[in-house]
Image: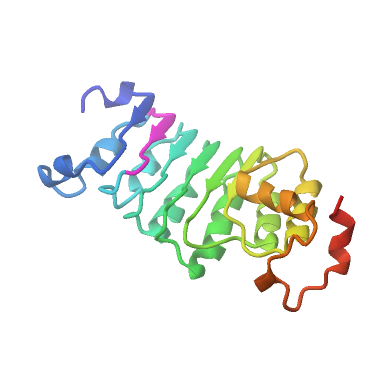
Amino acid sequence: MRHAKLIRKLGLRFSQKRLRYASPDMYIESYLACCVNVCWLDLSYNTSIISLAFLHSMHSLEYLNLHGCTNIDPINMMTCLKGCEALRAIDITNCIQFEENHIPSLIDTFRVITCLKMIRAFDINVSLTVENVRVILQTAKNIETFAITPAWGPPPAWVDLMREYDHIEFGEELQSQLDRVNLPNFLYEEEQGGISLAPCLKYVI
């Protein structure tokens, strides 16, 4: 660990189970806490990490990839992320441990990290609504890339949002909503109940 302070860019991907089983509890997290000058950290698919408390030591962290880190408690994740004042990019894709009751805290987390420029949150077991996203974007003024799995809109509501924030690059799942409204009969049969198509027709080319 004597060289930990020299590390600026670090990748510790995949499960690391062999290291976990051969080491004391929280060994990986304790080592990461020593890497105080890290600015780029890729932990994608690392299912051995169970806490992000080490983030409190990483004051220069700008990029964090937690794609597929499914064993981190959502409350721990959101609490620790809020202290990452320099964070510019976060990926929590496939963090399927999130549940519906975590949505308010997740929104608040994205809002308080004011330096964020990129958010990727595909397939996290919950879907954000148009209203959820609008709340985030109204506060997170620096966002340039926003990629999530959207809740039912209907599609024209998402199109309105994307046109309002046309300076932002939205992910492919949100872009698909735009593709849909440019097709005739774009609503699926199961989506049509209770939906008035009149406001939607203006989007059809």
Q: Residue 81, how many percent across, how many down?
A: 46, 48
Q: Residue 70 lies in what quarter of the image?
A: bottom left
Residue 89 left/right relative to 2: right
Residue 116 seen: no
Please, which residue is most extreme toward the left here? Answer: 22
Residue 68 left/right relative to 198: left
Q: Nearer the viewer, residue 178 or 93?
A: 178
Which residue appears at 46% of the width and 66% of the height?
A: 99
Which residue appears at 16% of the width and 40% of the height?
A: 19
Q: Nearer the viewer, residue 14 or 105?
A: 14
Which residue appears at 53% of the width and 37% of the height?
A: 89
Residue 36 seen: yes
Q: Main secondary structure of the magenta part?
A: loop
Residue 43 left/right relative to 127: left
Please, which residue is most extreme toward the bottom here? Answer: 194
Where 196 falls versus 46 (above or below)?
A: below
Highlighted range, magenta: 37-45
Where 147 falls versus 128 (above or below)?
A: above
Q: Nearer the viewer, residue 172 or 34?
A: 172
Which residue appears at 47% of the width and 56% of the height?
A: 124
Q: Residue 57, how many percent across, how many down?
A: 37, 38
Q: Is residue 44 magenta?
A: yes
Q: Residue 161, how many percent across, how many down?
A: 76, 53
Q: Residue 129, how many percent across, how many down?
A: 65, 62
